Amino acid sequence: MRAHESPRSSKNPLIEAPSRRTAPMTRVIAILSTTALVAIALVAACSDSTASSDGNDADTAAKTVTKAIVQLAGTKGNEKTMGSVTFTQQGDGVLVEATVSGLAPGKHGFHIHALGDVTCPDGKCTAGHWNPAGAKHGSPDADERHHGNLGNLEAGADGKATYKRLDKMIQLNGAHSIIGRGIIVHAGADDLTTQPTGAAGARVAQGAIGIAAEK
């Protein structure tokens, strides 16, 4: 080696090349690692959000129903008939209250029906009386009766009827809940004995039972 030559000139450039390529590769690995960490964080956040949402849904589903409501509308040919019905939990019973107008004077069969389908103009999509126990038709006070037997509404000369009864068979919760079922007002009186409907005649008003909003 000559005295004036720098020691660096003796180094093989081929040996230095790999180290020059190492820095870019390190940066790529760092970027990929950061991206992976961000992705993991996003997945975790989404999981937490989903868990929270599912928890809220579960809480909503688990709430005990304390009040239900129905808006009644007249069937075809009975468009002037309308009203509302509420079902309110009171102790071990359910308070049923109804106000209906546009009825012919006299008694009208008043029942909970199996389905809440009110798309048929004659009210028949609500099917028969709500009767999960397979019991005989009877009065609301009978030992054996349909769950849906509410007896009669009685309209005055002005066509208006009111109803109020604390019922011990109706359920707002559980396997026999009335939520989602139908309400029917009939053209004639329920005689409380004729099977299986009480011979109450045509259906003049119908509605579906829904959960009332909390106020």
Image (spheres, rainbow, N blue to C red):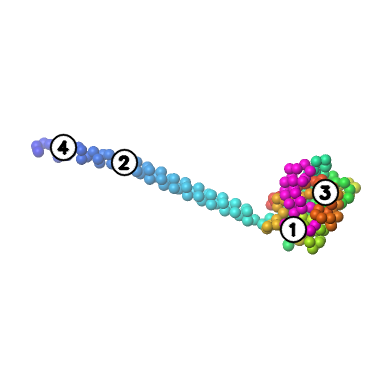
Residue that numbered label 4 is attached to: 9
- Residue beneath disc 2: 25
Q: Do labels 3 and 4 touch, CB within 8 Å?
A: no
Query: Of residues 65 and 137, which is closer to you in this image?
Result: 137
Of callouts 1 and 3, the N-terminal one: 1
Callout 4: SS: helix
Amino acid on which the number 2 mark rests in the picture: Met
User: What range of the chain is rendered magenta?
Assistant: 111-137
**Marks 3, 2: nearer the viewer:** 3
Give the residue type that dot 4 points to: Ser
Q: Amino acid at mark 1?
A: Gly
Badge nearest the viewer, 1 or 3: 1
Q: Amino acid at mark 3?
A: His
- Quarter of image, res 176: bottom right
Quick check: 81 left or right of 2? right
Q: Which residue is mark 1?
A: 134
Tell me residue 94's x, y (percent).
75, 58
